Every structure is written in C-alpha cells, then in structure tokens.
Amino acid sequence: MPHPAPTRLRMRRRDPRMVHPVAWWVWGVGLAAAAAHTTNPALLFMVVAVAGWVVIERREVGALDTFGPFLLIGLAAIALRVLMTVVLGNGIRGEIVIVHLPEVRLPDWLAGLRLGGSVSLESVVAAATEGLRLAATLVCIGAANALASPRRLLRYAPATLYDVGTAVVVALTFAPQLVELAGRVLAARRLRGHSGRGVRELARLVVPVLEGALDRSLDLAASMESRGYGRTPVRDRRDRVIGSTLAVAGAVGTTAGLYGVLAASDRGWLGLPTLAVGLVLLVASLVLGARRDARTAYRRDPWRAPEWAACALGLLPAVVLLRGESAGWPGITVAQVPLSWPPLPVPAVAAIALAGLVAWVTPVPPRLAAVRSRTAAGAPAPLLPEAA
C-alpha cells in the first residue's frame, strides 16, 4: 500500500503565524530607547506614528487593546508636565512672557522653584517637549504590549526570574484591563438608559469597576493556585549560597560598570570590563537557578528570519540616536532659548522610518489574516474570541 505524500512541516516566512514575543519587545524597547535620547518634537512624533502604524498592521484581532491606554497616559503626562511648569517653573528664563501669575515667595532652601510668577513661552515649550519624550517612550511600551502580550513573554522568562516576571506582567496588564472593564460597565449603563456625564456618572462607575477587578484577581489567584504556582523546589544550602553570592556580585559589578561607562573621569578602567564581568555573574546566577527550577513550555514560538529582522529594525534607531546624542548632531537635542525650529538629522529620520518596515517583514497574525481574507472576498468578518 503506497504511503501518502508527506505533508509540509516547515512553514514559509509569509505564512500567517504569531511572531515571537521577545522579538516584538526588543523592537518596542529599542524604539523607546530612541525616543528617550532625543528632544526633537518631529522625531518624537515620527516614533509615535511608526509605533501606531505597526500596531494597526500587526496587532492580533481580539487581543487586549493596550496601545490606546498608554497613549492616553502619555497625553496626560504632557499636560501634567506643562501644568507643573506653569505653577512651579522649570528653571528656564525665556524672553517671551505669556502670562504673569500672582507669585508667592518661597524660602531660600527652595531655590530654583517658584510658585506663580511670570510664565515664558520657552519654559512651556521645554516642558511640552520633555512630556512628549516621556509620552513617546510610553507609547512604544504600549505598542510592544499590544503586539505581544506580556503573558506570552512570561513563558520565556528564566525560571529564576519567573516570580518577578509575573509581577511585571500583572503591572503591565492591570491598567489596560481596568480601562477595558470601565468601558464595558459604561456600555452596560448606556444600554439601560443611563447616559449621564460628569463626576456623578464617574462615581457610579467606581464600584462596578472595582468589583470586577476584584473578581478577576480572585479568579486569577484560584487558577494559579490550582496549577501549583508558588511552590518552591527544595534546594540545599550550598546552592542557595552560591546563587545568592553570584547574584549580589553581579548586581554590584553591573552597577559599578554602568557608573564607569557613564562617568567620563574614570578613564575606562571601571567601565566596560566591570560591566561585562557583572553581566556574566548575573547570567551565571540565572543559569544556576534555572537548572534547579526547571519549567516546561507547550509549543514554543519559532524564531526565524522575521524575528531577527524585527530585532534589528528596533535596535537600529536606538543605536543611531544614541550615537547622535553623544556626538552632538544638530537636531537631536533641541535648545529652547532662543526658540527656533530644529533641523531634522537625516540618519535619525531614516532609522526611525526603517523601524516601520517591521510591518512588512513579519508575518500577519492568523486571526488578522482570516479577517482580511474574508473582507477581501466580500464576506462578513467572523466573530473571533478574545486572544490571549
């Protein structure tokens, strides 16, 4: 009896599949690092636009929308930064005065701060630029969170850092889930005829949202307990001493090495060598802990050429802008006094634009591909459950 033809086991690069979460987080963190090393508003707006475009093109259908909440938090950070500058000042004395506020004299030990007084246009622009830099950094983290759920990333965390990774995952997903729950409660109230606005309507949302968050927390705790989470393997005293010693020595070496890299007066002897030794000790402590606390993973995500391309495209703008900041390229760091529109450094613009190519070099998620194929065929989009 002839055997059937062997099926194709290896997927092609463009077949719909989920991209490895580590690749998405490397891309997002690299773009966030690029935003943190510039104060040029045009470059920061480019970073936000690239992050939003990639989320639109590659976010899985049904996944939790974390990009919107991070964008709102970034806008709130800009407004808060400007408000604090108007009230307290930021040490920049400009030439163009916008408004004169009633000033309160502060004691001498609060030198550098003011309460009220003259507000210059230069100080407000500087505050808005700093807030925009923080907002762009948050948006990049939100984009990575939307493209790859932290719960998927937790599967690849070292066993030694699993508890810490769980805490980080809960912290990253708490705010978006709270916003989503508030939207559901608000929609339910509107269906019941309650369409009020203002502080009173907000107060009526507090109890249902907190109750839903508490129920989710209890369900999560019960599911984690049923899976044996929190049980620690039995380790002898020798392993604990060696692991703790390596971790402490690695942390001290890494801190000293970072200080040596950032400080220019150490002539390099405390810089990269100490940092390298500290990182090696930290990796050794993680490997030792992972050998004593083995964990398994079901159906690991593949790591192929699209993942390498995503990492390279995310780290490229970080390297270029870090080089531009250290070399003093015009347009990377903007001077606020006097006010002038900064030039656009061509290498930085090209690097940020190339980061957007990740939307073409990575495969489309399966559910998004299904929706697009049905839409192209003229059929209604299928109702898909929420993605993990």
Image: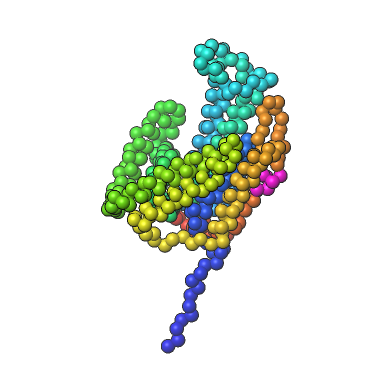
- Visual colour scheme: rainbow
Residue 332: horizontal and vertical position, in percent?
66, 38
Find the magenta span and give its range. Answer: 346-352
Q: Nearer the viewer, residue 306 or 50?
A: 306
Left or right: where 219 falls relative to 103:
left
Residue at point 45%, 28% (across, down) = 198
Q: Quarter-wise, where is residue 318 in the image?
A: top right
Q: Nearer the viewer, residue 241 or 48?
A: 241
Do we see residue 382 in this rendering?
yes
Q: Quarter-wise, where is residue 140 in the image?
A: top right
Query: Does the magenta-highlighted stretch encompass residue 41?
Result: no
Residue at point 41%, 27% (across, down) = 200
Residue 63: horizontal and vertical position, in percent?
46, 50
Residue 229: horizontal and vertical position, in percent?
31, 50
Do we see residue 373 in this rendering?
no
Residue at point 48%, 43% (across, down) = 254
The quadrant of the picture occupied by the N terminus is bottom left
Residue at the outermost bottom position: 1
Above or below for 335 versus 94: below
Q: Nearer the viewer, residue 88 or 270?
A: 270
Left or right: where 157 falls relative to 143:
left
Q: Nearer the viewer, residue 5 or 44?
A: 44
Query: How many callouts does the rendering have?
Result: 0
Query: Does the magenta-highlighted stretch encompass residue 351?
Result: yes
Q: Please identify the dominant SS of the magenta region.
A: helix
Residue 74: horizontal and vertical position, in percent?
53, 36
Residue at point 44%, 51% (across, down) = 283
